Amino acid sequence: MKIALIGYGKMGHMIESIAKERGHKIVSIIDQNNLDEFESIAFASADIAIEFTTPQTAASNILRAWAAGIPVVCGTTGWNVDSIKQEAENKKADGVGLMWSSNYSIGVNILFAINKQLAKFMEAYPNYTPHLTEVHHIHKLDAPSGTAKTLQEDIGDSKLAIKDIESIREGEIAGIHTVTWDSEIDTINISHSAKSRKGFALGAVIAAEWMKGKTGWHDFNEVISQ
């Protein structure tokens, strides 16, 4: 498979390495200094683009990729993804689409599933109050993280408000997410700790493999639930 990378920071480099290990070819690399590459023959030859950039540029990057006829797997968080969902569906006829996830780690997506089930179970026990803590490296731009927002949404805004999410930025921590249900009697914790960015990058490449040939809007849950 021929892959274009949009964004060439630490995640971009990690995705490049894993994609090559899995037998794929990187045909184009776009960063902030060569945006004209969107109009290149090399970019247009890609089967799919993987986008990890910034909240300010993600939407425009996706639109420029679509203009070249390239579907996108996007892992950028901190922007209004809902604003582009319908457009992704509308682009089916053009042969392009979008997969977005707040986190492409297999382990985190297992945490998502456990979190949903636990939240449903806890509906019968109102004496427990949820709280969420997320810890990331100092370079992360958005807070709370996209993963934390997904965990919050799956618990329910009425139970876990944004103000109940603690965001910590320190060192080079790849990501720690902990959901706590606390009562006067005891405390329940579920947590995921990433050892490196490799899990996120691997998941993004797996998503790209799954996404090849598909159009419209897709979510990473479709990949891991198969």
Image (cartoon, rainbow, N blue to C red):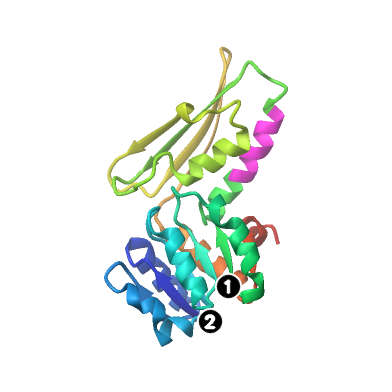
Please name whichever residue, 20 or 52, is drawn nearer the observer in this view of the structure.
52
**Disc 2 and disc 1: Cα gap in Å?**
8 Å
Please tell me which residue is depicted at 47% across the width and 77% down the height of the picture.
Answer: 3
Please tell me which residue is depicted at 65% across the width and 39% down the height of the picture.
Answer: 116
Residue 179's x, y, as percent?
53, 33
Magenta segment's dominant SS is helix
Residue 138's x, y, as percent?
29, 45
Looking at the image, residue 138 lies above or below residue 61? above
Rendering quarter of residue 221: bottom right
Residue 190's x, y, as percent?
55, 35
Give whichever of discs 2 and 1 has the lower sequence position.
2
Q: Which residue is mark 2?
A: 1
The type of residue carrying mark 2 is: Met
**Disc number placed over residue 209 in the picture, else none:** 1
The magenta segment: 112-121
**Disc number placed over residue 80 in the picture, else none:** none
Looking at the image, residue 113 lies above or below residue 132? below
